[in-house]
Image (cartoon, rainbow, N blue to C red):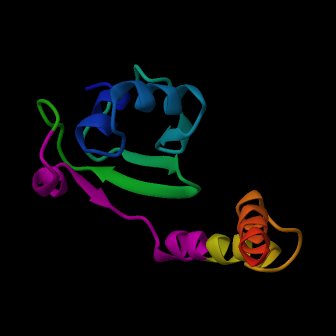
């Protein structure tokens, strides 16, 4: 089975087109080699997928005939993604909040409208 079809069928991507695009951009590796979308996948291959700033690592256990239900995905792949990858993603969320806390700095457009409404009510 093609790598893009495999990633779609084990529900790592919502559509095959998105999976194909990820392969073309170099976000998908099989056995530590960047691959094209047409690369065939076999049992015991190690796949690395970069998605949402997380490097998912999975091992192919079997190749499904077509897209499988969410409950059956475990039969076809083994997820070996380290927990540190998800913790790193949590740290990124906190880092984004660091730059501008709510209520500090220049008012946003919504804040400005609320201020104007408040001032109009008092007159």
51 left or right, relative to 46: right
**Residue 86 in view here:** yes
Spot occupied by residue 16 in the image (x, y as percentages of width and height): 34, 27
How many marks the image carries: the answer is 0
Q: Is residue 65 above or below residue 82?
A: above
Spot occupied by residue 118 in the image (x, y as percentages of width and height): 73, 74
**Residue 40 in view here:** no
36 left or right, relative to 63: right
The part of the chain drawn in magenta is 68-90
Quarter of the image that includes the C terminus? bottom right
Q: Name the quadrant containing residue 90.
A: bottom right
Q: Per the image, is 77 magenta?
A: yes
Residue occupying the point 77% across, 71% down:
115
Quarter of the image that includes the N terminus? top left
Please identify the dominant SS of the magenta region: helix
Residue occupying the point 73% across, 61% down:
113
10 left or right, relative to 110: left
Compare residues 96 and 19 and report the one nearer the observer. 96
Most extreme residue toward the right, as rendered? 106
Spot occupied by residue 42 in the image (x, y as percentages of width and height): 27, 35
Q: Is residue 90 above or below residue 112?
A: below
Spot occupied by residue 76 in the image (x, y as percentages of width and height): 18, 48
Residue occupying the point 13% across, 41% down:
68
Q: Is residue 11 above or below residue 108?
A: above
Q: Per the image, is 72 magenta?
A: yes
Compare residues 111 and 83 and report the one nearer the observer. 111
Q: Name the quadrant containing residue 4.
A: top left
93 left or right, relative to 54: right
Compare residues 47 and 121 and report the one nearer the observer. 121
Residue occupying the point 55% across, 25% down:
24
Q: Is residue 82 above or below residue 59?
A: below
């Amino acid at each position: 089975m093609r790598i893009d079809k495999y990633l779609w069928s084990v529900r790592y991507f919502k559509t095959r087109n998105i999976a194909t695009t990820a392969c073309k951009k170099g976000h998908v590796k099989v056995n530590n080699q960047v691959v094209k979308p047409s690369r065939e996948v076999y049992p015991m291959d190690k796949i690395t997928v970069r998605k949402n700033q997380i490097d998912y690592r999975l091992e192919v256990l079997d190749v499904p005939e077509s897209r499988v239900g969410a409950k059956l995905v475990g039969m076809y792949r083994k997820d070996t993604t380290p927990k540190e990858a998800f913790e790193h993603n949590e740290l990124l969320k906190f880092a984004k909040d660091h730059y501008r806390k709510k209520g500090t700095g220049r008012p946003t457009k919504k804040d400005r409208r609320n201020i104007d409404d408040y001032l109009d009510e008092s007159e």
